[in-house]
Amino acid sequence: MSLELFAAYLLACVVFTLVPGPTVTLIVANSLTHGTRAGLANVAGTQAGLAVFVGVLVIGLASVIETMGVWFDWIRFLGAAYLIWIGIKMFRSTGRLDDPGQTPKPRGGFFLQGFLVMLSNPKVLIFFGAFIPQFVNPAGDYVWQVILLGLTAMLTAAVTDGAYAILTGRARVMFTQTRVRFVSKLSGVFLIGGGVWLALTRTR
């Protein structure tokens, strides 16, 4: 892989990870209501989810999806339901900072929550499967190239998502309860919308 091609891939990764999606929405909402550590724990969880996707690519995307068959749609539906459930909880939040009774922490912890949200969207796997191979040199070692490109995507996501968590966590001191409640409800709407979109769209 040439340096120019890798630079183009890196730029594309930055652009894609900067665009807010379900994971960024979750990270921002938790950083705002529970603090920077909660957001960074979400980031760590999403990184673990991305690592699973990269591992699937290394094994072979087409063969894995073919083996999963109809279960792939069930995973999509379960993921959609999970996103909608989180969105409803956020929408119903009263927006009180650091009040466990008003903004309850996820039972499995923020790491597991981030991990599940990432895995709940199998479209990320399809995207990786369509995007990464475009930058693989057929004449080179496929496995090591996929690992390099996958790790690059993970590192880019870690930096951008981590920045969202840190900046939001530090900015929370400027937010009143009314503003936090508004952000929580807005985040809830986005997560519910993302879940509905995931349920209604087809991957194949």
Image: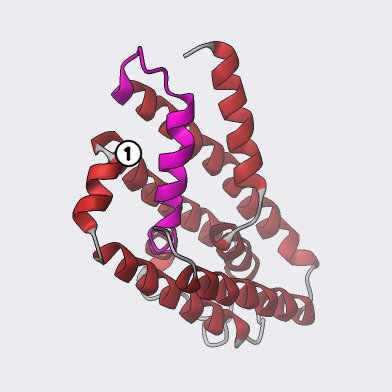
Q: Residue at x 42, y 31 (%)?
A: 133
The image quadrant where one finds the C terminus is bottom left
Alpha-carbon neighbours of circle 1 within 10 Å: few (<14), some, or many (≥20)?
A: many
In percent of width and height, residue 39 lies at 55, 58
Left or right? Give the position of 170 relative to 192.
right
Q: Is residue 117 magenta?
A: yes
* Magenta-drawn segment: 114-143
Amino acid at circle 1: Leu
Residue 97 visible (yes or no)? no
Residue farthest left in this picture? 67
- Mark 1 element type: helix
Q: Is residue 26 magenta?
A: no
In percent of width and height, residue 44 lies at 44, 50
In percent of width and height, residue 50 lies at 40, 46
Left or right? Give the position of 103 relative to 204.
right
The dominant secondary structure in magenta is: helix
- Front-most of residues 99 and 33: 33
- Find residue 118 and report its image quarter: bottom left
In percent of width and height, residue 162 lies at 58, 47
Q: Residue at x 61, y 34 (%)?
A: 12
- Front-most of residues 143 and 61: 61
Name the residue carrying label 1: 57
* Above or below, comparing residue 97 to residue 30 in the picture: below
Residue 174 visible (yes or no)? yes
* Above or below, comparing residue 167 to residue 155 in the picture: below
Left or right? Give the position of 114 relative to 16.
left
